[in-house]
Image: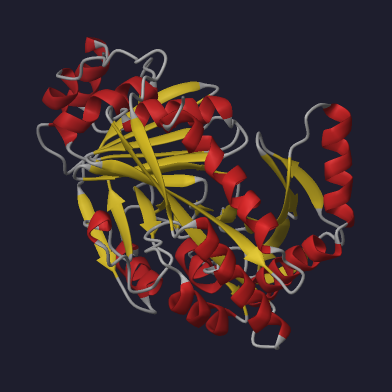
Amino acid sequence: MIPRSVLERLGASRGAVPCPVDPVLVARAAGPIFGEVRWFSEPGGRIRLGLGRQHRYVAAGPDRFATLREALVGRPAGEVAFVGFGFDPEGPASPEWAGFPAAEAVVPEVWIEAGSAGATIEVHPEATGVVDRLAELEAVPSAGVLEVGDHTVTSIPAPSTWRRDVAEAVEAIRSGTMTKVVLARAVRIVSAERPHPFELVDRLGLRYPGSYTFAWSHGPATFLGASPELLVASDLAWVRSNPLAGSAPRGEGELADEELGRGLMASPKDRLEHAIVVDDVAARLRPFVEDLEVPSEPSLRRMATVQHLSTTIVGRLARRVHLLDLVAALHPTPAVGGAPRDEAARFIAKVEAIDRGWYTGGVGWVDGTGRGEVAIALRCGLLGSDGTTLYAGAGIVADSEPDEELVETRLKFRPLLELLAAT
């Protein structure tokens, strides 16, 4: 799979070597040999792929991001770590999330980066026996058309229960307890066939090129998805965030689609939901910046099954700030938690019937200088040995209607549900 000439160069020196290889093929073949595979791709196609684990740092609690940052400070500037974390600072609690901590940073043994200019491969200077393992990689044939076989789909909680939870949230908001809260639900898919996780990631990337695709393996489980939302990116001079909140379905045909988009832009309920998120993100970024550009009006962000109100916020950093300090300031935004933050978190803990795990947490990368990028973990699922759990949520405000919010979650399930539960 990897040309002999590339393997020879990797064996002779440690540095980035041009490599004419398809990262998807490597990812699909690497699991049995390297044990762990991590994937993160940006809209537009730049792919970062990590094989194996050279260093791993885990953290939990309210200071989890500071703990990870301290562990990474002093590492070589060019060393890249994958970063992943859950919604709750104490981490997942249910057995299906075993192995996924509250937050972790992993430096892989092998780093592959691919874009329009081609791909490069690099072996960590402390890694041993890696070139021999790379030589063992053999292409795993594509499944072609995904044959999911017989399957069952179960809602958690039942739709009627979730609608009651939404009604309770609306009542709490109207009483003044909160201004917004995001409530999540799940569907559990048990199928006769288990698709390869990187077959799914590849198809998600092809179907949703405007999203961040990601995959993170722990033992038999892989957390994967195609998220439209950037939490934060930084190059140490500039910081960028792209909050999404307020949603509508796509229309059947151009005219219907445009009408739904205009309705979304004009909706007081959706504009309020969006403004709550944008105002919160801007307020939390201001202490770090000299200038902050916050558009006065949102734009429409159209995905395959749903369209969102979108605002891109850009700031010039006033000082050198590590990416994980920005993550600590922003997470959880009202796009995944609510406002005020603490009141929404308490309400979520009281009513939600699921363990979110890493859903509505984040996945991304950071290098030794502190620059990097993290996407909010949305449109995602946990693929295990005995089934897959998909997650979706909706932002609830005073004018929310439970039936409409349920439909919104169904639209958000579709990217993976259509792949896993085709009839």
Q: Nearer the viewer, residue 223 or 232?
A: 223
Q: Nearer the viewer, residue 401 or 389?
A: 401
Where residue 350 sits: x, y (%)? 45, 79
Total marks shown come to 0
Image position of 128 with respect to 137: above or below: below
User: Relative to 177, does residue 420 appear above or below in the rendering?
Assistant: above
372 in relation to 17, above or below? below
Residue drawn at (69%, 55%), measured in percent from left and top? 404
Residue 58, position in %: x, y?
26, 64
Residue beneath the point at 29% across and 41% down: 387
Q: Is residue 292 left or right of residue 209?
A: right
Residue 325, image x, y percentages = 48, 70
Question: Residue 136 occupies which quadrant of the picture?
Answer: top left
Res 387 visible: yes
Can you name the residue that lies furthest to the front here? 160
User: In the rendered image, which quarter is residue 42 located in?
Assistant: top right
Depth order, front residue of 317/232:
232
